Amino acid sequence: MVGIVGYGTHIPRYRIKVEEIAKVWGADAPSYKKGLNLNEKSVPAPDEDCATLAVNAARNAVRRAGIDPQDIGAVYVGSESHPYAVKPTGTIVSEALGACPYVHTADLEFACKAGTEGLFIALSLVKAGEVTYALAIGADTSQGAPGDALEYSAAAGAAAFITGSNNLLAELVDTHCYMTDTPDFWRREHAYYPEHGGRFTGEPAYEKHVHGATNAILKKTKMKPEDLDYVIFHQPNGKFPVNAAKKLGFKEPQYRHGLLAPTLGNTYSGSSPMGLAATLDEAKPGDLIMLVSYGSGSGSDAFIFRATERLQQVRDIVPRVRKQLDEHKIYVEYGTYAKFRRKILKPE
Amino acid sequence: MKVPRHWRETPRRYRMEAGKCKKCGSIHFPARLVCTECGTKEFETVRLSGKGELASYTVIRVAPTGFSDLAPYAIGIVKLDEGIRVMGQVADCDPETLKIGDRVTTQFRRINEEGKTGMIMYGYKFVPDLGL
């Protein structure tokens, strides 16, 4: 049996409200708040990036796992905002944790799905017996073009999971993937901001793949929506995952613990993994948890986990997601946000 | 060229590795070749907790090159729980509200970068210990 032995998250303390962004661009804040089910989003500090978020989340995962970082045999960092175009984030993370030098490391990129890609590989490597423990991280400091709809949601955060085959806090029941070539969102080489297909990102992209992966894993495991205690879908905003849950036959108590986007925004590669972490913060032994990611381009990875007795013993070793999300927030105005996110042109 | 120096200092910048004297137990950060307390040359490598209390601080308002976007920011001397004093930036706070004795912890952060195309240097910074 393989599964998760430790998990950890990191959310920056800074926040910006939808009203503050809408005010600058002359947009109607209430329609964004209602239309996208978004109230505010996290903003990385000027000294935070994908690598720092990943390290701070991974350190929490190591504490919950209670393992020696030297026993981690693989480190995968999924992100669309790796700090270098050429030079791995994974080596920075591995070195900071103390997992070097006998470790396999790779950086992954698949829009918002890169975090669960790492989780899929990390679980598979342990299952194959190649490593004792593997670390998978979804971390992003995503950028939306100024004034674009994405600017209201593009947020920052990281979630890390250590996989193994003993002392599990959640056992893997099964996985399934659903992938097609669907150009709904992209960022070309050297482009600073991504572009997207507007409404095309909905039905033929997010919905088709999330539904496809969900239906496939339910069929594979011979389960029905009501068999699952918790579900987490990728959260590009607060609206898409709720619509997907309802259409697929899930009820509010099943998805509310993992739904973070209304006050977190979209942490891209960290989005659905962060929802899984928030759900593990609440789940009881024996509970079945389904995670379905979505990455533009496009694809969804689906996982079903079963919580174990150990989850309750280790969850409060480090702060829960809700504490990081709800407490000690620092609100910034658009000017400060633009400075933090390097949206202001300065002389070299 | 900062690359070799930064790379050499990775163990202490990334993991706060210190030298603990095998004879008298005193901790040196950064690690030393000779113990200043007993003269011994034998050490074991230990990782500092990064937690402690603010012993003193100053606020930087006119920052050196590469740090101007962060101003005003605090540089503090922190008495770690291990008993030694370490200097570092105190991030994620309004420097005007800091008080000597405040509990702080460390996080992994960007320290500096060599322009827009050069190396990014990472390391520890202190932040208020709010249990996050």
Image (cartoon, grey):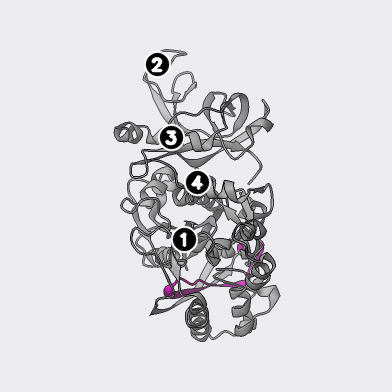
Query: Residue B116: image x %, image y %?
Result: 37, 44
Residue at 49% x, 34% y is B68
Q: Name the residue nearer the viewer: A322 or B98.
A: B98
Looking at the rendered structure, the kind of residue marked 4 is: Glu
The label shown at residue A48 is: 4
Q: Which residue is mark 3?
A: B66
The label shown at residue B118 is: none
C-alpha separation, residue under disc 4 versus residue under disc 3:
15 Å
The label shown at residue B40 is: 2
Looking at the rendered structure, the kind of residue marked 2 is: Thr
Q: Which residue is mark 1?
A: A163
Labels 2 and 4 positioned on one and the same chain? no
Labels 2 and 3 positioned on one and the same chain? yes
Q: Name the residue nearer the viewer: B4 or A175.
A: B4
C-alpha separation, residue under disc 3 versus residue under disc 1:
39 Å
Looking at the rendered structure, the kind of residue marked 3 is: Gly
Q: Secondary structure at mark 4?
A: loop
Q: Residue furthest front?
A: A26
C-alpha separation, residue under disc 2 versus residue under disc 3:
39 Å
| Magenta-colored stretch includes residue B61 | no
Q: Is residue B45 left or right of residue B98?
A: left
Q: Secondary structure at mark 2?
A: loop
Q: Is residue A5 left or right of residue B14?
A: right
Query: Which quadrant of the structure image shows residue A45?
Result: top right
C-alpha separation, residue under disc 2 versus residue under disc 1:
42 Å
Mark 3 or 1: the one toward you = 3
Residue numbers of the magenta segment: A280-303
- Residue A258 seen in render: yes
Mark 2 or 3: the one toward you = 3
Labels 3 and 1 positioned on one and the same chain? no
Q: Secondary structure at mark 1?
A: strand
| Chain letter belonging to callout 4 | A
